[in-house]
Image (tube, rainbow, N blue to C red):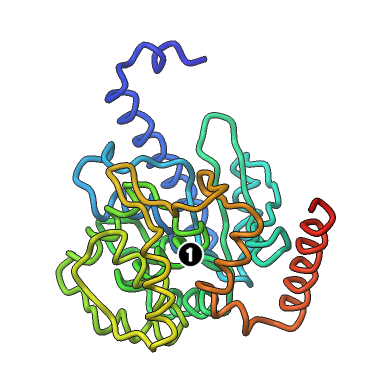
Amino acid sequence: MNPIRDTLKEPQADFVRQVLADAQFEEILDALEKADLHVAPLKGILFRRWLYANPTERPLSDLDLLVPPEMEEPISAQLVGLGYTPMDSLMARFRFGAIKEKIFLREGGLPVELHRSPASGRGAKRLSARIFQDGLRGSAPLFRDGALIAPAEHHLLSLAFHFREHWLCFRACQLDDARRLIRLPGFDVGKLETLAKDCDALLPLSLLFYAAEIDKTFTLPAELAFRKRLLTRRLCISEQGCWLDLPGFQAYGLSQGWRLALHTLILRDSLSESTSSQVEHGLYYLKTLADFVRKS
């Protein structure tokens, strides 16, 4: 219980939460900068300072940090030194370890999540490499040198991967992030399309633009154009965000059967992942099919 915070009105409480989140992130950057380590902030913590004049316009639930694989351990050690407790979390489309992240918790602060990639799949891993290749350190007045800020096009594509990872379910603020990114001075839609092609992400990017009602289109191959038409018919858009109108839908989740169907429709790049990943997906598919037959 915090008696001061508990007596604040909601707008004031929102402002206090965002100020505390800023202070928490600056503390982390201080420690990383002294150790000559660098992270690329993702989503909320970056967008709130980059795209919004009022910090309460962009709520935060955690601090997402992209880390180079070779720096994950030393960065983890710095967080432990600041009093955080590490927790491993397996994030996957089919409940196997397609992508692994580390979550760090400290009483009174937001969870800190270390990501090796913005999402699962080879395309997202290629984007991660591009973020560290093309990003700039510091980018004042956003953050100090402990942070590496990638171009806006990279972050919009990262949002598309995140959109895909969460089954085309987005909160309204995340759709607003996309709209604000593309309105930044110098934003290059052609560069974005080239990057999306290189990362096999044209379909999720096109779907994100549709959901955010951004008036830009990309040239999709016939197969992807058909999939887009099929999916947009079931995509609901409102002031609360967007979601798929499918049986069994729950916030940020779908029934197992619909997940398998969407995997086929959306996640083309995952079909060209490592052999072990394909085997795991095949085993999961067989298990799901067997469960369905047994229950029938």
- Residue 250: image location, x then y, percent: 53, 44
Looking at the picture, does residue 132 appear above or below residue 6?
below
Q: Is residue 37 visible?
A: no
Is residue 291 rendered to the left or right of residue 83? Answer: right
Quarter holding residue 54: top left
- In the rendered image, residue 124, in percent from the top left (x then y), is placed at 51, 74
Q: Amino acid at mark 1?
A: Arg
Q: Mark 1 = which residue?
A: 164
Q: Position of residue 2 (x, y in %)?
A: 47, 15
Q: Is residue 183 left or right of residue 36?
A: left
The residue located at (65%, 81%) in the rendering is 273
Q: Report x, y in % for residue 93.
A: 63, 62
Q: Nearer the viewer, residue 65 or 157?
A: 157
Number of marks: 1
| Outermost residue toward the front in this view | 296
Which of the 4 quarters of the picture holds residue 115?
bottom right
Please tell me which residue is depicted at 68% across the width and 47% down the height of the picture: 86
- Does residue 114 lie above or below 70 as drawn? above
Q: Is residue 211 left or right of residue 243?
A: left
Q: Disc 1 on helix, strand or loop?
A: helix
Instruction: Answer whether residue 249 is visible to the viewer in this image.
Output: yes
Residue 273 versus residue 14: which sits nearer the camera? 273
Q: Residue at x 25, y 84 (%)?
A: 190
Instruction: Tell me: 157 left or right of 32.
Output: left
Residue located 15% across and 69% down the image: 185
